[in-house]
Image (cartoon, helix red, strand yellow):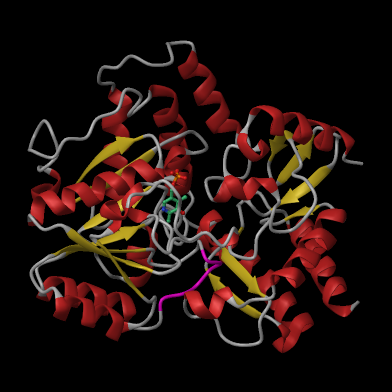
Amino acid sequence: MDTKSKELFLKAKKYIPGGVNSPVRAFGAVGGWPRFIASAHKDRLVDVDGNEMIDYVCSWGPGILGHAHPRVIEKVQEACKDGLTFGAPTKKEVLLAELIAELVPSIEDSRLVSSGTEAVMSAIRVARGYTRRDKIIKFKGCYHGHSDGLLVKAGSGALTTSMPDSAGVPADYTKNTLVASYNDRASVKNLFEADPEEIAAVIVEPVAANMGVVLPEKGFLEFLREITKKYGALLIFDEVITGFRLALGGAQEYYGVRPDLTTLGKIVGGGMPIGAYGGKREIMEMVSPAGPVYQAGTLSGNPIATTAGIETLLILKEDPDIYRRLNQKAGEIALAVKEAAKDAVCLNQAGSLLSIFFTSHKVTDYESAADSDTASYGRYFNYLLDRGIYVAPSQFEAMFLSDAHTEEDIAFTCQMIRDFFNQ
Ligand SMILES: *Cc1c(COP(=O)(O)O)cnc(C)c1O
Protein backbone atom coordinates (compact mmCIF):
# COMPACT_ATOMS: atom_id res chain seq x y z
CA MET A 1 0.00 0.00 0.00
CA ASP A 2 1.26 3.44 -0.81
CA THR A 3 -1.88 5.59 -0.70
CA LYS A 4 -0.54 8.03 1.87
CA SER A 5 2.64 8.61 -0.11
CA LYS A 6 0.57 9.19 -3.22
CA GLU A 7 -1.70 11.67 -1.44
CA LEU A 8 1.28 13.52 0.01
CA PHE A 9 2.95 13.69 -3.39
CA LEU A 10 -0.18 15.19 -4.96
CA LYS A 11 -0.35 17.74 -2.17
CA ALA A 12 3.41 18.41 -2.36
CA LYS A 13 3.08 19.23 -6.03
CA LYS A 14 0.73 22.07 -5.11
CA TYR A 15 3.31 23.78 -2.94
CA ILE A 16 6.76 22.55 -4.06
CA PRO A 17 8.01 22.52 -7.67
CA GLY A 18 7.66 18.93 -8.85
CA GLY A 19 6.69 17.96 -5.31
CA VAL A 20 10.27 17.50 -4.11
CA ASN A 21 13.22 19.50 -2.80
CA SER A 22 15.80 17.72 -5.00
CA PRO A 23 14.92 16.40 -8.48
CA VAL A 24 15.89 12.71 -8.38
CA ARG A 25 13.56 12.14 -5.42
CA ALA A 26 10.53 12.55 -7.66
CA PHE A 27 10.89 9.05 -9.23
CA GLY A 28 10.56 10.66 -12.67
CA ALA A 29 13.13 8.25 -14.11
CA VAL A 30 11.50 5.04 -12.85
CA GLY A 31 7.78 5.83 -12.89
CA GLY A 32 5.24 6.04 -10.08
CA TRP A 33 5.49 8.39 -7.14
CA PRO A 34 8.07 8.74 -4.39
CA ARG A 35 7.67 7.08 -1.01
CA PHE A 36 7.46 9.67 1.75
CA ILE A 37 9.68 8.56 4.60
CA ALA A 38 8.46 8.71 8.18
CA SER A 39 11.48 7.26 9.99
CA ALA A 40 14.65 5.28 9.48
CA HIS A 41 16.73 3.06 11.72
CA LYS A 42 19.80 1.02 10.85
CA ASP A 43 19.36 -0.24 7.27
CA ARG A 44 15.59 0.24 7.12
CA LEU A 45 13.37 3.06 5.96
CA VAL A 46 9.73 3.20 7.02
CA ASP A 47 7.36 5.20 4.81
CA VAL A 48 4.17 7.00 5.82
CA ASP A 49 2.10 3.95 4.83
CA GLY A 50 4.12 1.79 7.22
CA ASN A 51 6.13 -0.06 4.54
CA GLU A 52 9.58 -1.12 5.67
CA MET A 53 12.34 -1.05 3.06
CA ILE A 54 15.99 -2.10 3.06
CA ASP A 55 17.75 1.12 2.10
CA TYR A 56 20.57 1.22 -0.46
CA VAL A 57 20.41 4.98 -1.01
CA CYS A 58 21.61 5.90 2.49
CA SER A 59 20.58 9.52 1.92
CA TRP A 60 22.89 9.47 -1.15
CA GLY A 61 25.95 8.68 0.91
CA PRO A 62 25.96 10.18 4.40
CA GLY A 63 24.44 7.08 5.98
CA ILE A 64 27.60 4.98 6.13
CA LEU A 65 26.76 3.86 9.68
CA GLY A 66 23.10 3.26 8.87
CA HIS A 67 20.26 5.47 10.08
CA ALA A 68 19.89 6.93 13.56
CA HIS A 69 23.10 5.52 14.98
CA PRO A 70 22.49 5.68 18.76
CA ARG A 71 25.80 7.38 19.53
CA VAL A 72 25.27 10.10 16.93
CA ILE A 73 21.64 10.70 17.98
CA GLU A 74 22.59 10.94 21.64
CA LYS A 75 25.34 13.49 21.01
CA VAL A 76 23.06 15.55 18.79
CA GLN A 77 20.30 15.56 21.40
CA GLU A 78 22.77 16.68 24.05
CA ALA A 79 24.14 19.42 21.80
CA CYS A 80 20.65 20.76 21.04
CA LYS A 81 20.14 21.61 24.68
CA ASP A 82 22.98 24.13 24.49
CA GLY A 83 21.52 26.07 21.58
CA LEU A 84 21.26 25.59 17.84
CA THR A 85 23.51 28.30 16.42
CA PHE A 86 25.69 31.09 17.73
CA GLY A 87 27.33 32.73 14.73
CA ALA A 88 30.57 32.71 16.72
CA PRO A 89 33.41 30.16 16.94
CA THR A 90 32.95 26.91 18.86
CA LYS A 91 35.30 24.21 20.13
CA LYS A 92 33.57 21.64 17.92
CA GLU A 93 34.62 23.40 14.72
CA VAL A 94 38.22 23.11 15.83
CA LEU A 95 37.77 19.43 16.73
CA LEU A 96 36.21 18.63 13.36
CA ALA A 97 38.93 20.52 11.44
CA GLU A 98 41.54 18.64 13.47
CA LEU A 99 39.90 15.29 12.68
CA ILE A 100 39.67 16.11 8.98
CA ALA A 101 43.35 17.06 8.91
CA GLU A 102 44.25 13.85 10.73
CA LEU A 103 42.22 11.57 8.46
CA VAL A 104 42.46 13.08 4.97
CA PRO A 105 46.06 12.79 3.71
CA SER A 106 46.27 16.03 1.69
CA ILE A 107 44.38 18.34 4.06
CA GLU A 108 46.14 20.59 6.54
CA ASP A 109 43.59 23.40 6.84
CA SER A 110 39.90 23.24 6.02
CA ARG A 111 36.83 25.44 6.02
CA LEU A 112 33.33 24.26 6.92
CA VAL A 113 30.33 25.23 4.84
CA SER A 114 26.77 23.89 4.75
CA SER A 115 26.63 21.74 1.60
CA GLY A 116 28.76 19.99 -0.98
CA THR A 117 27.72 22.56 -3.55
CA GLU A 118 29.12 25.35 -1.41
CA ALA A 119 32.32 23.42 -0.73
CA VAL A 120 33.05 22.94 -4.43
CA MET A 121 32.08 26.47 -5.37
CA SER A 122 34.45 27.83 -2.74
CA ALA A 123 37.32 25.48 -3.59
CA ILE A 124 37.17 26.62 -7.21
CA ARG A 125 37.28 30.24 -6.06
CA VAL A 126 40.36 29.49 -3.97
CA ALA A 127 42.04 27.72 -6.87
CA ARG A 128 41.39 30.73 -9.09
CA GLY A 129 42.58 33.17 -6.45
CA TYR A 130 45.71 31.17 -5.78
CA THR A 131 46.74 30.61 -9.40
CA ARG A 132 45.35 33.96 -10.66
CA ARG A 133 43.82 32.06 -13.56
CA ASP A 134 40.17 31.76 -14.60
CA LYS A 135 39.60 28.50 -16.46
CA ILE A 136 38.84 25.12 -14.97
CA ILE A 137 38.53 21.65 -16.43
CA LYS A 138 35.73 19.34 -15.37
CA PHE A 139 34.67 15.96 -16.73
CA LYS A 140 31.54 15.10 -18.59
CA GLY A 141 29.15 13.23 -16.27
CA CYS A 142 30.85 14.36 -13.06
CA TYR A 143 28.57 16.28 -10.71
CA HIS A 144 29.95 18.98 -8.45
CA GLY A 145 26.79 20.51 -7.02
CA HIS A 146 24.51 23.03 -8.65
CA SER A 147 26.57 26.24 -8.75
CA ASP A 148 26.30 28.03 -12.10
CA GLY A 149 29.80 27.47 -13.42
CA LEU A 150 29.66 23.72 -12.80
CA LEU A 151 26.30 22.94 -14.36
CA VAL A 152 27.96 21.94 -17.58
CA LYS A 153 27.68 18.31 -18.65
CA ALA A 154 26.89 17.51 -15.04
CA GLY A 155 25.73 14.17 -13.66
CA SER A 156 23.17 13.16 -11.03
CA GLY A 157 19.67 14.64 -11.46
CA ALA A 158 20.86 16.74 -14.37
CA LEU A 159 21.75 13.53 -16.23
CA THR A 160 18.52 11.74 -15.39
CA THR A 161 16.33 14.49 -16.75
CA SER A 162 18.50 14.74 -19.89
CA MET A 163 19.12 18.40 -19.14
CA PRO A 164 22.86 18.50 -18.60
CA ASP A 165 22.78 22.27 -18.88
CA SER A 166 20.34 24.25 -16.79
CA ALA A 167 18.14 27.11 -17.86
CA GLY A 168 18.98 30.29 -16.00
CA VAL A 169 22.74 29.91 -16.29
CA PRO A 170 24.18 32.70 -18.45
CA ALA A 171 26.64 31.46 -21.06
CA ASP A 172 29.11 33.97 -19.65
CA TYR A 173 29.17 32.03 -16.35
CA THR A 174 30.25 28.78 -17.97
CA LYS A 175 32.65 30.08 -20.61
CA ASN A 176 35.58 29.32 -18.29
CA THR A 177 34.45 25.75 -17.69
CA LEU A 178 36.25 23.42 -20.08
CA VAL A 179 34.94 19.89 -20.39
CA ALA A 180 37.06 16.75 -20.79
CA SER A 181 36.07 13.07 -20.96
CA TYR A 182 36.50 10.85 -17.92
CA ASN A 183 39.39 8.38 -18.32
CA ASP A 184 40.44 10.10 -21.55
CA ARG A 185 43.92 11.52 -21.03
CA ALA A 186 44.16 13.01 -24.52
CA SER A 187 41.07 15.13 -23.90
CA VAL A 188 42.77 16.70 -20.87
CA LYS A 189 46.10 17.09 -22.58
CA ASN A 190 44.49 18.87 -25.54
CA LEU A 191 42.80 21.40 -23.26
CA PHE A 192 46.07 22.16 -21.46
CA GLU A 193 47.98 22.48 -24.73
CA ALA A 194 45.39 24.90 -26.09
CA ASP A 195 45.43 27.02 -22.91
CA PRO A 196 48.71 26.32 -21.10
CA GLU A 197 48.64 29.39 -18.84
CA GLU A 198 44.95 29.93 -18.26
CA ILE A 199 43.80 26.81 -16.41
CA ALA A 200 43.46 27.23 -12.66
CA ALA A 201 42.38 23.71 -11.78
CA VAL A 202 41.18 20.31 -12.83
CA ILE A 203 38.25 19.11 -10.74
CA VAL A 204 37.34 15.43 -10.73
CA GLU A 205 35.35 12.88 -8.77
CA PRO A 206 38.18 10.41 -8.12
CA VAL A 207 35.55 7.71 -8.47
CA ALA A 208 32.72 9.13 -10.52
CA ALA A 209 29.48 8.34 -8.74
CA ASN A 210 26.95 10.69 -10.30
CA MET A 211 26.65 9.05 -13.74
CA GLY A 212 26.33 5.74 -11.98
CA VAL A 213 29.65 4.51 -10.59
CA VAL A 214 32.56 4.83 -13.02
CA LEU A 215 36.04 3.88 -11.84
CA PRO A 216 39.20 5.73 -12.78
CA GLU A 217 41.28 3.54 -15.05
CA LYS A 218 44.70 2.57 -13.78
CA GLY A 219 46.99 5.58 -13.94
CA PHE A 220 44.27 8.13 -14.73
CA LEU A 221 44.39 9.96 -11.39
CA GLU A 222 48.20 9.84 -11.41
CA PHE A 223 48.09 11.35 -14.90
CA LEU A 224 45.89 14.21 -13.64
CA ARG A 225 48.33 14.77 -10.78
CA GLU A 226 51.26 15.04 -13.19
CA ILE A 227 49.69 17.20 -15.86
CA THR A 228 48.28 19.73 -13.37
CA LYS A 229 51.69 20.03 -11.78
CA LYS A 230 53.36 20.44 -15.15
CA TYR A 231 51.08 23.35 -16.11
CA GLY A 232 50.95 25.02 -12.69
CA ALA A 233 47.27 24.21 -12.18
CA LEU A 234 45.72 22.76 -9.02
CA LEU A 235 44.17 19.31 -8.79
CA ILE A 236 40.87 19.26 -6.92
CA PHE A 237 39.36 15.96 -5.80
CA ASP A 238 35.65 16.27 -5.23
CA GLU A 239 35.36 13.68 -2.47
CA VAL A 240 31.85 14.66 -1.40
CA ILE A 241 30.83 11.02 -1.97
CA THR A 242 34.15 9.16 -1.73
CA GLY A 243 35.46 10.96 1.36
CA PHE A 244 35.40 8.66 4.42
CA ARG A 245 33.65 6.05 2.24
CA LEU A 246 36.26 4.35 0.06
CA ALA A 247 38.64 4.51 3.00
CA LEU A 248 38.97 6.63 6.13
CA GLY A 249 41.16 8.97 4.08
CA GLY A 250 38.87 8.81 1.04
CA ALA A 251 39.81 8.10 -2.56
CA GLN A 252 43.15 9.88 -2.12
CA GLU A 253 44.15 7.26 0.42
CA TYR A 254 42.55 4.40 -1.56
CA TYR A 255 44.40 5.29 -4.77
CA GLY A 256 47.44 6.96 -3.21
CA VAL A 257 47.15 10.22 -5.16
CA ARG A 258 47.25 13.56 -3.34
CA PRO A 259 45.24 16.45 -4.72
CA ASP A 260 45.95 20.10 -3.87
CA LEU A 261 42.39 20.75 -2.71
CA THR A 262 39.68 18.38 -1.54
CA THR A 263 35.96 18.94 -1.17
CA LEU A 264 33.93 16.98 1.35
CA GLY A 265 30.24 16.65 2.18
CA LYS A 266 27.74 13.89 2.92
CA ILE A 267 29.52 11.63 5.47
CA VAL A 268 31.45 14.54 7.03
CA GLY A 269 28.12 15.85 8.37
CA GLY A 270 26.94 12.49 9.69
CA GLY A 271 23.45 13.20 8.32
CA MET A 272 23.38 16.93 9.03
CA PRO A 273 24.09 19.65 6.45
CA ILE A 274 27.86 20.18 6.20
CA GLY A 275 30.36 20.58 3.46
CA ALA A 276 34.07 21.23 3.81
CA TYR A 277 36.99 22.12 1.60
CA GLY A 278 40.63 22.00 2.44
CA GLY A 279 44.20 21.44 1.39
CA LYS A 280 47.71 22.64 2.01
CA ARG A 281 48.00 25.55 4.42
CA GLU A 282 49.73 27.70 1.82
CA ILE A 283 46.70 27.44 -0.48
CA MET A 284 44.01 27.66 2.23
CA GLU A 285 45.64 30.80 3.62
CA MET A 286 44.08 32.50 0.60
CA VAL A 287 40.70 32.33 2.33
CA SER A 288 39.32 35.39 4.11
CA PRO A 289 40.10 36.67 6.73
CA ALA A 290 43.58 35.12 6.32
CA GLY A 291 43.67 36.05 2.63
CA PRO A 292 41.89 37.82 -0.22
CA VAL A 293 39.40 35.08 -1.30
CA TYR A 294 36.03 35.86 0.24
CA GLN A 295 33.86 33.05 1.57
CA ALA A 296 31.45 33.12 4.52
CA GLY A 297 28.33 31.47 5.96
CA THR A 298 25.79 32.30 8.67
CA LEU A 299 25.39 28.65 9.66
CA SER A 300 28.89 27.46 8.70
CA GLY A 301 30.31 25.17 11.37
CA ASN A 302 26.89 24.86 12.97
CA PRO A 303 27.22 23.27 16.44
CA ILE A 304 24.61 20.54 15.85
CA ALA A 305 25.95 19.61 12.43
CA THR A 306 29.55 19.51 13.64
CA THR A 307 28.44 17.30 16.55
CA ALA A 308 26.94 14.74 14.15
CA GLY A 309 30.01 14.92 11.90
CA ILE A 310 32.55 14.53 14.69
CA GLU A 311 30.77 11.54 16.24
CA THR A 312 30.42 9.83 12.85
CA LEU A 313 34.12 10.29 12.03
CA LEU A 314 35.11 9.10 15.51
CA ILE A 315 33.09 5.90 15.10
CA LEU A 316 34.74 5.28 11.71
CA LYS A 317 38.17 5.99 13.16
CA GLU A 318 37.71 3.68 16.14
CA ASP A 319 36.59 0.80 13.94
CA PRO A 320 38.58 0.83 10.69
CA ASP A 321 37.47 -2.76 10.07
CA ILE A 322 34.21 -1.13 8.94
CA TYR A 323 35.70 -0.71 5.45
CA ARG A 324 36.46 -4.41 5.14
CA ARG A 325 32.90 -5.25 6.19
CA LEU A 326 31.42 -2.72 3.76
CA ASN A 327 33.50 -3.98 0.86
CA GLN A 328 32.61 -7.58 1.62
CA LYS A 329 28.87 -6.83 1.61
CA ALA A 330 29.15 -4.87 -1.62
CA GLY A 331 31.16 -7.75 -3.06
CA GLU A 332 28.35 -10.20 -2.24
CA ILE A 333 25.83 -8.10 -4.12
CA ALA A 334 28.24 -7.65 -7.02
CA LEU A 335 28.73 -11.40 -7.24
CA ALA A 336 24.99 -12.10 -7.17
CA VAL A 337 24.45 -9.63 -10.01
CA LYS A 338 27.28 -11.02 -12.12
CA GLU A 339 26.12 -14.62 -11.68
CA ALA A 340 22.48 -13.87 -12.41
CA ALA A 341 22.75 -11.23 -15.12
CA LYS A 342 25.92 -12.46 -16.83
CA ASP A 343 26.68 -10.18 -19.79
CA ALA A 344 23.31 -8.43 -19.75
CA VAL A 345 24.63 -5.73 -17.41
CA CYS A 346 27.88 -4.00 -16.55
CA LEU A 347 28.58 -4.02 -12.84
CA ASN A 348 30.97 -1.37 -11.54
CA GLN A 349 32.13 -1.44 -7.95
CA ALA A 350 34.52 0.65 -5.88
CA GLY A 351 34.40 -0.32 -2.22
CA SER A 352 30.86 0.19 -0.94
CA LEU A 353 29.71 2.03 -4.09
CA LEU A 354 28.04 -0.03 -6.81
CA SER A 355 26.26 0.45 -10.11
CA ILE A 356 24.35 -1.99 -12.26
CA PHE A 357 24.32 -0.52 -15.75
CA PHE A 358 21.80 -2.11 -18.06
CA THR A 359 24.19 -2.37 -20.96
CA SER A 360 26.32 -5.18 -22.34
CA HIS A 361 29.49 -3.12 -22.80
CA LYS A 362 31.96 -1.72 -20.31
CA VAL A 363 31.10 1.61 -18.72
CA THR A 364 34.16 3.84 -18.48
CA ASP A 365 32.86 7.34 -19.19
CA TYR A 366 29.77 9.45 -19.76
CA GLU A 367 28.96 8.13 -23.25
CA SER A 368 29.20 4.48 -22.30
CA ALA A 369 27.02 5.13 -19.22
CA ALA A 370 24.46 7.26 -21.02
CA ASP A 371 23.32 4.63 -23.52
CA SER A 372 22.20 2.24 -20.76
CA ASP A 373 18.69 0.87 -21.04
CA THR A 374 16.88 3.05 -18.53
CA ALA A 375 13.54 1.30 -19.10
CA SER A 376 15.10 -1.96 -17.90
CA TYR A 377 16.54 -0.12 -14.91
CA GLY A 378 13.03 1.14 -14.14
CA ARG A 379 11.68 -2.45 -14.16
CA TYR A 380 14.53 -3.59 -11.92
CA PHE A 381 13.92 -0.68 -9.52
CA ASN A 382 10.19 -1.36 -9.26
CA TYR A 383 10.68 -5.12 -8.91
CA LEU A 384 12.93 -4.51 -5.90
CA LEU A 385 10.73 -1.77 -4.44
CA ASP A 386 7.72 -4.11 -4.53
CA ARG A 387 9.77 -6.54 -2.46
CA GLY A 388 10.85 -4.00 0.13
CA ILE A 389 14.24 -3.05 -1.32
CA TYR A 390 14.93 0.63 -1.96
CA VAL A 391 17.65 1.37 -4.52
CA ALA A 392 18.35 4.66 -6.29
CA PRO A 393 15.39 5.78 -8.43
CA SER A 394 17.73 6.39 -11.36
CA GLN A 395 20.17 4.40 -13.48
CA PHE A 396 22.70 7.16 -13.02
CA GLU A 397 23.08 7.11 -9.24
CA ALA A 398 25.14 4.82 -7.04
CA MET A 399 24.01 2.00 -4.77
CA PHE A 400 25.34 2.69 -1.26
CA LEU A 401 26.13 0.15 1.45
CA SER A 402 26.18 0.92 5.15
CA ASP A 403 27.68 -0.79 8.16
CA ALA A 404 24.13 -1.40 9.38
CA HIS A 405 23.20 -3.71 6.49
CA THR A 406 22.76 -7.13 8.05
CA GLU A 407 23.91 -10.39 6.49
CA GLU A 408 20.24 -11.48 6.29
CA ASP A 409 19.22 -8.33 4.45
CA ILE A 410 22.14 -8.65 2.04
CA ALA A 411 21.25 -12.31 1.40
CA PHE A 412 17.58 -11.40 0.82
CA THR A 413 18.61 -8.59 -1.55
CA CYS A 414 20.91 -10.95 -3.49
CA GLN A 415 18.05 -13.46 -3.80
CA MET A 416 15.64 -10.82 -5.10
CA ILE A 417 18.23 -9.62 -7.61
CA ARG A 418 18.70 -13.21 -8.81
CA ASP A 419 14.93 -13.66 -9.06
CA PHE A 420 14.64 -10.48 -11.12
CA PHE A 421 17.24 -11.58 -13.64
CA ASN A 422 15.94 -15.16 -13.77
CA GLN A 423 12.30 -14.27 -14.45
C1 LIG B 1 26.35 15.40 -3.65
C2 LIG B 1 27.52 15.92 -4.35
C3 LIG B 1 27.81 17.29 -4.41
C4 LIG B 1 26.86 18.34 -3.91
O1 LIG B 1 26.62 18.23 -2.55
P1 LIG B 1 25.27 18.89 -1.95
O2 LIG B 1 25.43 18.71 -0.48
O3 LIG B 1 24.15 18.10 -2.55
O4 LIG B 1 25.25 20.30 -2.36
C5 LIG B 1 29.00 17.69 -4.96
N1 LIG B 1 29.87 16.80 -5.46
C6 LIG B 1 29.62 15.48 -5.44
C7 LIG B 1 30.65 14.54 -5.96
C8 LIG B 1 28.42 15.00 -4.92
O5 LIG B 1 28.17 13.70 -4.95
Q: Is residue 34 magenta?
A: no
Expressed as whole percent of the image width and height from the top left, the position of residue 151 reads: 40, 55
Stretch of the chain drawn in magenta? 211-216
In the rendered image of this protein, does residue 374 appear above or below residue 409?
below
Q: Nearer the viewer, residue 389 or 193?
A: 193
Is residue 397 visible in the rendered image? The answer is: no
Is residue 35 visible in the rendered image? The answer is: yes
Q: Which of the 4 quarters of the picture holds residue 416?
A: bottom right
Q: Nearer the viewer, residue 329 or 113?
A: 113
Expressed as whole percent of the image width and height from the top left, the position of residue 351 reads: 52, 67
In the rendered image of this protein, does residue 373 appear above or below residue 61?
below
340 displayed left or right of 277: right
16 displayed left or right of 227: right
Expressed as whole percent of the image width and height from the top left, the position of residue 363 reads: 54, 80
Q: Which of the 4 quarters of the picture holds residue 296?
A: top left
Q: Which of the 4 quarters of the picture holds residue 117?
A: top left
Judged by its main secondary structure, the magenta piece is loop
Number of marks in picture? 0
Q: Residue at x 22, y 72 (%)?
A: 225
Q: Residue at x 56, y 67 (%)?
A: 212
179 displayed left or right of 79: left
In the rendered image of this protein, does residue 223 appear above or below residue 94?
below
Quadrant of the image containing the N terminus: top right
Q: Residue at x 64, y 76 (%)?
A: 372
Quadrant of the image containing the C terminus: bottom right
